[in-house]
Image (cartoon, helix red, strand yellow):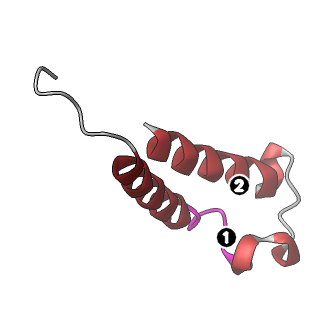
Amino acid sequence: MAGLLLGLGFTLIYIINFTPSLGGTGAPADLFLGISTTCIGTVGMVINFVVAFAVSRLTPAPSQHV
């Protein structure tokens, strides 16, 4: 859940902040590493995987009952 929320949250905030029709700037100089809003989902996916992996390593395994 942590990976999903952070990846999706990052992607949505980025799209809202940089899409001119949604009130964002849209200026190419402001974009993160020059990545357009149509391609930022890939970065959100990487964030999702990294956070999900880290959380799975840092938390105990679920009980046998679960």
* Dot placed on the residue nearer the N-terminal end, 2 or 1: 2
Q: Please tell me whether mark 2 or mark 1 is closer to you in this view.
A: 2
Report the quarter where the C terminus lies: top left
Q: Is residue 3 magenta?
A: no
Q: Position of residue 10 (x, y in %)?
A: 64, 51
- Residue found at x 43% / y 36%: 1
> Which residues fall within the magenta stretch?
34-40
* Residue depicted at 88% across the width and 59% down the height: 25
Q: Under tag 2, what secondary structure? A: helix
**Amino acid tagged 2:** Tyr
Three-letter amino acid code of the residue under disc 1? Ser
Please identify the dominant SS of the magenta region.
loop
| Residue 6 at x, y percent in the picture | 56, 46
**Would you say 49 lies left or right of 65 here?**
right
Q: Is residue 35 magenta?
A: yes
Taking depth in this image into account, of 53 and 62 the one nearest to the observer is 62
Give coordinates of residue 14: x percent, y percent: 71, 54
Q: Which residue is mark 1?
A: 36
Residue 31 in the figure: left or right of residue 50:
right
Q: Are marks 2 and 1 in contact (CB under 8 Å)?
A: no
Q: Which picture quadrant has residue 39?
A: bottom right
Q: Nearer the viewer, residue 31 or 62?
A: 62
**Residue located farthest toward the top when viewing the structure as drawn:** 65
Q: Nearer the viewer, residue 36 or 66?
A: 66
Instruction: Establish if 17 lies above or below 65.
Output: below
